[in-house]
Image (cartoon, rainbow, N blue to C red):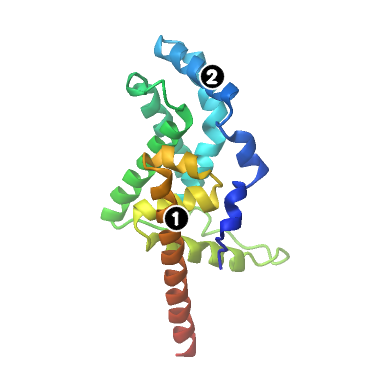
Amino acid sequence: MLTMTDSDANYGSSEAEADSDDSLASQANDARLVEQARHGDTDAFGGLVQRYERRVIKVIRRFMPDQEMALDLAQDAFLKAFDRLEQFDPSRRFGPWLFRIAVNTTYDHLRKIKRKGKWALFSEAGENRVPDPQAPDPRGEIDLSQEVRTVLEDIPETYRTVLVLRDLEGFSTSEVAAVTERSEATIRWRLAEARRMFKEAWDRRQRCIEEEQLG
């Protein structure tokens, strides 16, 4: 089962810490690039893309595991951010504003394909490949990932977003608050609720699987 505990308060991996936009220097650099991009400097916006692209794609893939679609959604999110630069409040941090656009863009896409009845947890691109008999069986890892995604789908969006950003992507509480435009107290409460919902949904699903296996 996916382990989610308060010990995750170390904000995740060193990569997440390295990419964090909390430092005053990085915030000042973002502000400078945003201002230049607002005046038509596409290279300046390219600098912002280069800085955030990898982490934006990583966050999107938590909701949309298909790599190609995640890349498309990331590109769409950056285009929306560029078009909306005039709406950005320069007194705030650019990173959380961008991640909010990316998450909303992803949810919009998921709602659209779900309405069309085409939602699938994993891409079917490789389903016709002949498996290598010498390779280790990947089904165990895939099954676990799929189970986690399936359970996350049962959690309401507002709670799922907090859970994914905080526990899976290592965002700090203040970063999640900025992305979702909610207070840190609200984020802490939603995180506790989301963890409870996940555990209950996970336990229910495991019981159902065990009952099916017993016939």
The type of residue carrying mark 1 is Leu
Q: Which residue is mark 2?
A: 28
Let me know if residue 138 appears in the view.
yes
Return the x and y of residue 70 as percentages of the image width and height: 47, 43
Q: Secondary structure at mark 2?
A: helix
Q: Residues within 10 Å of mark 1 (few under 14, many from 20)?
A: many
Query: In the image shown, does 14 or 181 lie closer to the viewer?
Result: 181
Residue 80, relative to residue 11: is it above or below? above
For image coordinates 62% across by 39% down, the residue present is 17
**Image location (x, y in percent) of residue 183:** 39, 43
Point out residue 34 in the picture as x, y percentages from the top left corner.
45, 18
> Residue at the location (38% across, 35% down)?
101
Q: Nearer the viewer, residue 84 or 126?
A: 84
Name the kind of residue labelled 2 in the image: Ala
Q: Which residue is mark 1?
A: 191
Q: Quick one: label 2 or label 1, which is nearer the N terminus?
A: 2
Q: Residue at x 37, y 23 (%)?
A: 89
Taking 166 as reference, is 71 above or below it? above
